[in-house]
Amino acid sequence: MYSKTLLSDIAREQLEEVRRREDFVVREKLAQTKSYSGMAALVIKGVRRCGKSTLLKQVMRSLFPDGFYYFNFDDDRILDFETRDFQTLMEAFVGTFGEKRVVFFDEIQNVRGWELFVNRLLREGYRVFLTGSNADLLSQELGTHMTGRHVDVELYPFSFREFLHAKKLAFEVKGFSTKEKAVLSKSFAEYMERGGMPEAIVFSNDAMLSQVVNDIIQKDILRRYRVGKPNEFRSILRFLLNNVGNKLSFRSVSSSFGVSSPNTVQKYIEYAEETYLVFTVNRFDMKIKRFEKNAKKIYCVDNGIVAKNSLTAIQNRGALLENLVAVEFKRRGRQFYYYVNKNGSETDFITVQNNAFHAVQVCVDPINPVTMEREQNALVSTMKELKLKKGTFITMDYEEIKILKGMTIEFIPAWKWLLEN
């Protein structure tokens, strides 16, 4: 058990640290969190160091400038914090800060049984805000003990719009001058390579892009899941980061790395997904039985992480652009897949919204005649098979609208697509 004095000291220090922390960019998710009614716990989920604590601070400042408690459980001084320590923590809060009715808890999933304590706070009328960086633990505990008593907000690294704000670049979405287009195109090229992890962008701390992967491996995966062969897991994770946008099968990866079973590879990938570091995309298939058996595509939550932890990605602009588009679909809450035509050609993404399909092809340089023919034919084939009238090419800079066989294909620069949608 931890003493009330120690917990009080930690809470005071943590609150001072949060208040000192500068938040240069107002997160786009702030509006969503501010609209929270308070009848359930609001849970902000996302990869480590994507800005969850900063978003909490923005909520604190905008809604509760003085009246709240704050505690971060990702602290080496409380590694053995247990359920019984929660009551001592609440007593420390009251003794240090007086009576408050709002609580903010960072990385609370580190404590076994936390959901029972949060349930009690909700019953007692507290407003509760939580963050977490492990999807599996959060979903298990929320689903078991807090069904209907939580609202989830998924936070990602900076969007392109937030990236521009961090760079103090102003822009108008309605029409772009030639100069603005040049600035936005250049800024997007930087965003595509450096990603949107707040610390890397605001403080130019690219070293954290390697450190966050190491922390995820050590703290969120090896320690939590007690992986028997840590070096084997590290090799698989590095492989994933070197192959964003590529299809993979558990069996082929198992064979390539000498892993005992494809099931082990599947578990490794699931562990990485649960930390929000990577995610997989399924092949579009109307037949449910084939849906899960098809090879999946792998993507990473941030291009900067890919570039910093991959030997080849920085030289593969096509993979980086495709990864960025996939992350944007996730950020927007889209349901999406990749598509394989009957002739074997592929379209990068099929999105589904309101029971309507939309085909999206990602191509850095469609001006190249060979590239244009290949990618365009694949998209047209997909549109024919799905009976679609409109399709989209997301490019680096190329912009045009084509009418082909009665179908409309829009070529749009990625920076413009990101800002207009």
Image (spheres, rainbow, N blue to C red):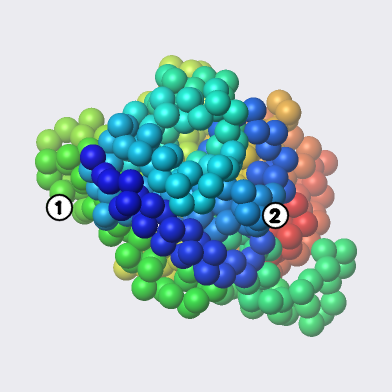
Whether residue 126 sits left or right of residue 175 in the image: it is left
Q: Amino acid at mark 2?
A: Ser
Judge whether 291 appears above or below 262 on screen: above
Identity of the residue drawn at 87% across and 64% down: 174
Q: Position of residue 75 (x, y in %)?
A: 32, 54
Which residue is more in the foreground, 166 or 378? 166
Identity of the residue drawn at 47% across and 39% down: 281
Foreground: disc 2 or disc 1: 2
Instruction: Determine if residue 65 is in view.
Output: yes
Q: Earlier in the sequence, mark 2 or mark 1?
A: 2
Identity of the residue drawn at 42% across and 33% down: 138
Residue that carries the numbered disc 2 in the rendered image: 62
- The secondary element bearing badge 1 is classed as helix
Judge whether 204 appears above or below 125 on screen: below
Mark 1: few, some, or many residues within 10 Å (few <14, many ≥20)? Answer: few
Residue that carries the numbered disc 1 in the rendered image: 231
Judge whether 400 appears above or below 384 on screen: below
Residue 370: image quadrant is bottom right
Name the image quarter holding the N terminus. top left
Q: Compute the Cα span from label 2 to label 1.
A: 45 Å
Q: Position of residue 268 (x, y in %)?
A: 26, 40
Whether residue 270 sits left or right of residue 283 in the image: it is left
